[in-house]
Amino acid sequence: MTLEETDDQDNIRLQKVLARLGFGSRRTCENMISAGRVKVNGAIAELGRRVDLTKDAVEVDNIAVSIEPDLVYYLVNKPAGTLVSAHDPEGRPLLIDILPASPRVFSVGRLDYATEGLIIFTNDGKLAHALTHPSSGVEKEYLAQTYHDPSNLALRQLREGVEIEPGVITLPAKVGHLSPCLVKITICEGRNRQVRRMFEEAGYPVKRLVRTRIGPITDTALSPGHWRFLSVEEVRLLSYASSNSPKRAKL
Ligand code: URA
């Protein structure tokens, strides 16, 4: 934070607050303020307005913005060959190293070293717990490329449930055969290496696996190795999804 942005610890320019919360770039947020879409304590905010995060009530389009200045939510597109872990004795690349060092965040769930795609990092333990709890049932969507084109029987097994370890049968999944050797699979559990193990059990090991959606969160414009803040609306939707998902993919 620079002197231009803050007079003291408590008063921060509104556009910076909104940008931090994921409403867009600083310029976009300035435009929102100029357009009269932002209110502070019930009054339309002027550009240049500073807010005290502990006292002022901020609304965008008449919807209250919950300001938790200490909480951050990053959406990351994990490239293959990176580790979702805080340390690695083998010195492999850590995904967390592409994120700001402060505040310290942790991943919401995991992706394997070879798996690519969307993963959330946050310091919001409550939301992370809600999303990863076995009862949350939040959908996770993957694109799985296989070495051989899966048979209809294999696709049915994936859809209906596969015994991935003795006594553990996966819940029904949504499975779409997009093209030869390319399957979209949506699961609502988060067992270790679940998708790879499901395909292995069905007889069609996965060559490449990419997570393309976490509940309501998707982003086809985010390149591998890049991250962005989740918007307030996305955090709200995630929180809603974690408490309202049926415990199976919608078939
Ligand atoms: N399923 C897998 O097999 N690997 C992942 O990384 C995520 C889901």
Image (cartoon, rainbow, N blue to C red):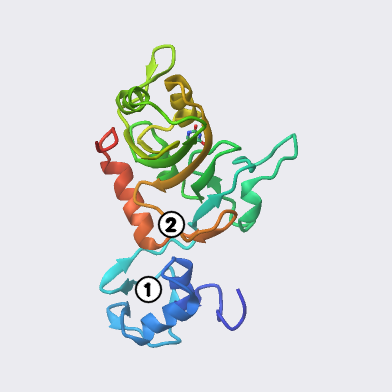
Ligand 1 under 8 Å from disc 2 Cβ: no
Residue pictured at 48% horizontal, 74% vertical: 25
Nearer to us: label 1 or label 2: 2
Residue 142 lies, in percent from the top left, at: 43, 41
Ligand 1 under 8 Å from disc 1 Cβ: no
Residue 157 occupies quadrant = top left
Residue pictured at 34% horizontal, 71% vertical: 57
Q: Residue furthest top?
A: 166
> Looking at the rendered structure, which numbered label has been put on residue 94?
none
Eyeballing the image, is 59 above or below 96? below
In the rendered image, which residue does mark 2 sit on? Answer: 219
- In this view, the residue in front, 10 or 229, is 229
Check disc 1 and report its element: helix, strand or loop: loop
In the rendered image, which residue does mark 1 sit on? Answer: 56
Residue pictured at 40% horizontal, 47% vertical: 213
Identify the amino acid type marked 1. Asp
